Image (tube, rainbow, N blue to C red):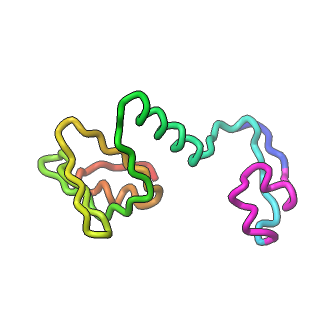
């Protein structure tokens, strides 16, 4: 990603506001201005808006999906921690955005993710 430069503790929050709550527990960082990264929360917010406005999608955020129920490689339902079971119709699309637990959640579909 090109040359990086050191960012002192006082300047870290200007690059990543979510780190400001850590105070002095983060003593420095390295910023690579040419690196191609994005702020995930902003991306998901924009993606949600497009899916709802352009496609009329129902978008559920902060849903604790415990298990994907699959039949012959097709998602049939999502089982949530609160007991709700969301039925997935044939023309539905399920987008999984759950970070480090993605691989475990997608296991019933035999999908490997590089996380």
| Placement of the N terminus among the 4 image quadrants | top right
Q: Main secondary structure of the magenta part?
A: helix
Q: Residue 86, how many percent across, how many down?
A: 24, 55
Query: Which residues make up the magenta segment?
Result: 6-24
The residue depicted at 59 percent of the width and 43 percent of the height is 42
Which picture quadrant has residue 8?
bottom right
**For residue 8: magenta?**
yes
Q: Is residue 7 above or below residue 38?
A: below
Q: Is residue 70 above or below residue 37?
A: below
Q: Is residue 6 above or below residue 50?
A: below
Left or right: 102, with 78 as reference point = right
Q: Residue furthest left?
A: 72
- Looking at the rendered structure, the number of numbered marks drawn on it comes to 0
Q: Residue 112, how many percent across, how many down?
A: 34, 49
The residue depicted at 39 percent of the width and 45 percent of the height is 59
Q: Residue 73, how many percent across, how many down?
A: 17, 46
Residue nearest the viewer, comparing 70 with 92? 92
The residue depicted at 47 percent of the width and 56 percent of the height is 99
**For residue 83: magenta?**
no
The residue depicted at 46 percent of the width and 53 percent of the height is 115
Which picture quadrant has residue 55?
top left
Q: Residue 78, how many percent across, how many down?
A: 25, 56
Residue nearest the viewer, comparing 61 with 104? 61
Q: Residue furthest top?
A: 54
Residue nearest the viewer, comparing 74 with 43? 43
Left or right: 77, with 16 as reference point = left
Q: Is residue 71 above or below residue 83?
A: above
């Amino acid at each position: 990603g090109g040359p990086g430069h050191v960012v002192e503790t006082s300047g870290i929050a200007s690059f990543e506001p979510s780190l400001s709550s850590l105070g002095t527990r983060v003593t420095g960082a390295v910023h690579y201005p040419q690196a191609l990264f994005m702020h995930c929360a902003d991306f998901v917010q924009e993606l949600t808006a497009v899916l709802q406005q352009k496609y009329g999608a129902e978008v559920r955020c902060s849903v604790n999906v415990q298990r994907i129920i699959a039949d012959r490689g097709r998602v049939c339902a999502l089982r949530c921690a609160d007991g709700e079971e969301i039925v997935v119709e044939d023309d539905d699309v399920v987008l999984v955005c759950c970070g480090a637990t993605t691989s475990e959640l997608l296991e019933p579909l035999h999908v490997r993710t590089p996380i």
